Image (cartoon, rainbow, N blue to C red):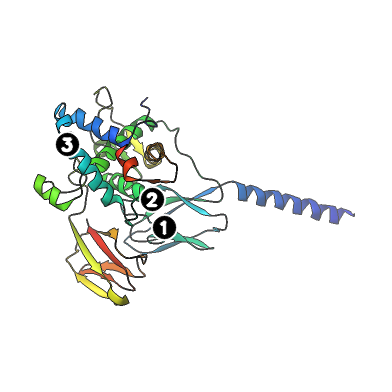
Amino acid sequence: MTNFGTRSFRGIALTLAALAVGGAAVAEDQELADAAIAAFTAADFDQNGKVSWEEFRNRVVGVFGQMDKDGDGQIAGGELPPAVDESGAVAQPGTVSAESFTASVAAAFKASDKDGDGELSADEWSGH
Amino acid sequence: MNFNSRFIVILMLGMGLMLVGTTLHARTLVCESSDRQTRRCPVDTRGGVHLSVQFSEASCRQGSTWGYDRRAVWVANGCRARFDIGASQSSYSSNNDSDRAALLALTLIGAVVSASNNDNDRDRRGRRDRYDYRPGDRYQNYGPSQRITCESEDGRRQFCSVNLRRSKVDIDRQLSNTTCRYGDNWGWNRRGIWVSKGCRAVFAVY
């Protein structure tokens, strides 16, 4: 089982980018960092320089909600996008409930909230 | 103490224990706003309310699209969520789909965190929205089709015309210090978005 508790968001982004485009991701590191800051600014709903759990949840869970076409609180079958794990193996299709998804997102948020203030700073967002 | 008095004492003790049990154990409540309407879900909220699971793509922001008073939880503008009622909070972490959920979370977090939302940047790259991401390019359809800035100046009502037929509207960014509360100082219909009472925001149209 993948340990998400110790992984930074920057690490997540770079891992996914590396899986997608291989070595090209290294060359695009700066571009990715710039995009991460832009994404942070977009997620900072009240523009206070930090992203709260509520702001983060709305950003990420909102996408989950869009994928949940029938609105039954879970993503299954064709609603689930293709994904690969750290080894590059294709994840087996199945069902993901909103409850489990929320728990995973919350764990990742908590792991990145280094100072434990309940919000992500730009540095915490970028994994610095 | 006669029999009746003893019975009453036992009954009161029993009721007291029942009350303690009710207080200590969180109850859950699913409250859903359909068709943008504000919905009140009656419940005793004196033990507190915590949003535990958000089901909707529409945002659930406390004080804006959900909240509570002593007698009910309310939701608005499409917010659908499960709420914990009471002191403790539910935990959802040991389900059978946890591995799959973690992987999906990883993917979507990566997409959201690393994807630029800057309009100029998006134009330069020819991208359409903030959720696009290269693996499978499956996120292009997740994001607003346009953004509209609508501002209430000096507390006056302002109507921002835009064709919203078959669309949904959410606040993308609040610009005012005044909280924009759906149905109170902002709303929308097929012809556009209205704001009042100092609500200023960038609205996302989906």
Q: Please report whichever mark, 3 or 1, sits nearer to the chain's N-terminal start.
A: 1
Type of residue at label 1? Gln
The residue indicated by pointer 3 is B134
The chain holding disc 3 is B
The answer to whether marks 1 and 2 sit on the same chain is no
In front of the other: A91 or A73: A91
Q: Give neighbour class at mark 2: few <14, some 14-19, many 20+ (Cα, 10 Å).
A: some
The residue indicated by pointer 1 is B62
The quadrant holding residue B176 is: bottom left
Type of residue at label 2? Glu
Q: Give neighbour class at mark 3: few <14, some 14-19, many 20+ (Cα, 10 Å).
A: some
The quadrant holding residue B93 is: top left
- The quarter of the rendered structure image containing the C terminus of chain A is top left
Say if A5 sits above or below A52 in the image. above
Secondary-structure class at tag 3 = loop
Type of residue at label 3? Arg
Distance Cα–Cα, label 3 vs label 2: 27 Å
The residue indicated by pointer 2 is A54
The reply to whether discs 3 and 2 touch (Cβ–Cβ < 8 Å) is no
